[in-house]
């Protein structure tokens, strides 16, 4: 296995992801979320052409998933465990492996990497790593194509490890999407309320009408780690913050943090999340709905006017929201409401694998 060199200098942009090459994995398992949007009988039949039945595990609830992970990690039978079903499914397996490492049941060096399959809706992690169609990737693995095992930084909070999270409009949209899906379940409209079309319908019919007249909340962002770096939209360093220094106080409609550039659907909301080694990006947006709609392509690519946002690279930061708690999302899944949030860079990156290109 060979690691690529990555600069740790905060003054030098990170040019490539850190990865090692796994050649000829002895045996791989595949654990899939049978409730994922793209999981159908035809997909199941196709997957079985590339994955022996003894190595294919389907789960449709939390308890079944935990029992399956226990079985997969009980021995050292598998060099890599592939999973698919959305970013939440991938991060669930990352957390289960990390929990066993911290409990002393696995060594960090001996833990199998998590293989990433494209089977969800937003697919932020799959987009970041360059995963292709699930069948194409499984065919490549079955034929012996080497794997790129990437070291991907994670954030850490009370909920465990995750690549991105946020409060405000992004979480509002997820809640509205879930409400819309529930409203049309088992009706003729069900197939039109999933994926990007479903998100668009939720935004147009629920989120925008509700938030368009709302004033932004007031919040504070405090640096709790070592040095933090305020940047512009091009990633240039504008200001350096010391530990415990107040970095931002003011309005916000979205406040999020991420260790990877993408939200779902290739929205590059955090374009500098991996620009500098050992930092994540925290971004607060305080513009209006009309600005996003009028500049949707730029927003999609992360190019937001500097007078409408605050950008900082941090290792540990706290967000304190005035007033009522705001809707919160983690890895693209609704996660209740929060008023005080700590986002910390996890001490160890997750090991995520995809077939080599």
Image: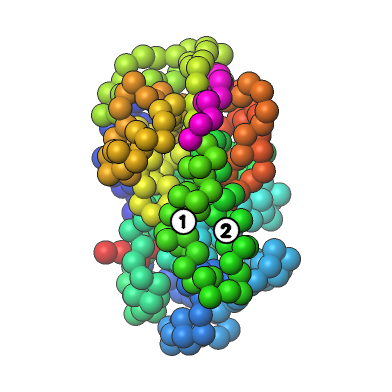
Q: Is residue 273 visible from the viewing direction of this image?
A: no
Q: Considering the numbered disc 2 on the image, is that residue within a helix, a strand or a loop?
A: helix
How busy is the neighbourhood of tag 1: few (under 14 within 10 Å), some, or many (20 plus)?
some
Q: Which mark is residue 253?
A: none
For residue 323, side relative to residue 222 (left or right): right
How busy is the neighbourhood of tag 2: few (under 14 within 10 Å), some, or many (20 plus)?
many
Which is more toward the observer, 197 or 234?
A: 197
Which is more toward the observer, 347 or 275?
A: 275
Which is more toward the observer, 17 or 338?
A: 338
Which image quadrant: the N terminus?
A: bottom left
On the image, the x and y values in percent for residue 69 come to 65, 66
Which image quadrant: the C terminus?
A: bottom left
Note whether 44 is above or below 22 in the view shown. below
On the image, the x and y values in percent for residue 173 come to 52, 47
On the image, the x and y values in percent for residue 237 come to 31, 20
Note whether 192 is above or below 228 in the view shown. below
Marks 1 and 2 sit apart, C-alpha to C-alpha, by 8 Å
Residue at image location 51% in from the left, 31% down from the top:
213
N-term mark: 1 or 2: 2
Instruction: Find out whether the residues at labels 1 and 2 contact each other: C-beta distance under 8 Å.
Output: yes
Residue at image location 30% in from the left, 38% down from the top:
294
Q: Which mark is residue 180?
A: 2
Q: Which residues are magenta?
A: 212-222
Q: Is residue 71 visible from the viewing direction of this image?
A: yes
Color theme of the render = rainbow
Residue at image location 40% in from the left, 28% down from the top:
287
For residue 30, side relative to residue 10 (left or right): right
Note whether 9 is above or below 164 in the view shown. above
Read off the residue under disc 1: 201
């Amino acid at each position: 296995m060979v690691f690529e060199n990555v600069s740790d200098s905060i003054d030098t942009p990170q040019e490539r992801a850190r990865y090692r090459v796994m050649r000829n994995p002895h045996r791989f398992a595949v654990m899939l979320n049978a409730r994922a949007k793209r999981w159908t009988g035809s997909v199941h039949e196709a997957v079985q052409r590339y994955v022996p039945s003894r190595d294919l595990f389907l789960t449709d609830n939390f308890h079944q998933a935990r029992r399956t992970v226990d079985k997969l990690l009980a021995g050292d039978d598998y060099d890599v465990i592939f999973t698919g079903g959305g970013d939440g499914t991938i991060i669930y397996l990352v957390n289960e492996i990390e929990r066993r490492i911290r409990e002393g049941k696995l060594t960090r060096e001996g833990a199998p990497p998590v293989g990433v399959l494209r089977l969800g809706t937003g697919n932020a992690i799959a987009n970041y790593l360059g995963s292709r169609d699930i069948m194409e990737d499984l065919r490549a693995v079955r034929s012996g194509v080497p794997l790129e095992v990437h070291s991907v930084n994670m954030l850490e909070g009370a909920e465990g490890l995750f690549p991105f999270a946020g409060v405000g409009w992004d979480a509002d949209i997820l809640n509205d999407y879930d409400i819309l899906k529930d409203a049309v379940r088992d009706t003729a409209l069900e197939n039109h309320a999933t994926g990007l079309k479903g998100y668009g319908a939720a935004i147009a019919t629920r989120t925008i009408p509700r938030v368009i007249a709302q004033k932004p909340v007031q919040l504070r962002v405090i640096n709790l780690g070592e040095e933090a770096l305020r940047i512009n939209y091009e990633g240039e360093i504008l200001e350096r913050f010391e530990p415990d220094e107040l970095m931002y106080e003011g309005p916000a409609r979205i406040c999020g943090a991420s260790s990877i550039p993408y939200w779902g659907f290739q929205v590059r909301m955090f374009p500098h999340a991996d620009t500098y080694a050992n930092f994540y990006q925290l971004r607060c947006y305080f513009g209006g709905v009309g600005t996003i709609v009028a500049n949707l392509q730029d927003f999609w690519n992360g190019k937001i006017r500097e007078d409408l946002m605050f950008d900082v690279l941090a290792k540990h930061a706290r967000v304190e929201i005035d007033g009522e708690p705001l809707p919160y999302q983690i890895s693209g899944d609704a996660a209740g409401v929060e008023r005080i949030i700590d986002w910390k860079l996890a001490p160890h990156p997750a090991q995520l694998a995809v077939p080599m290109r």
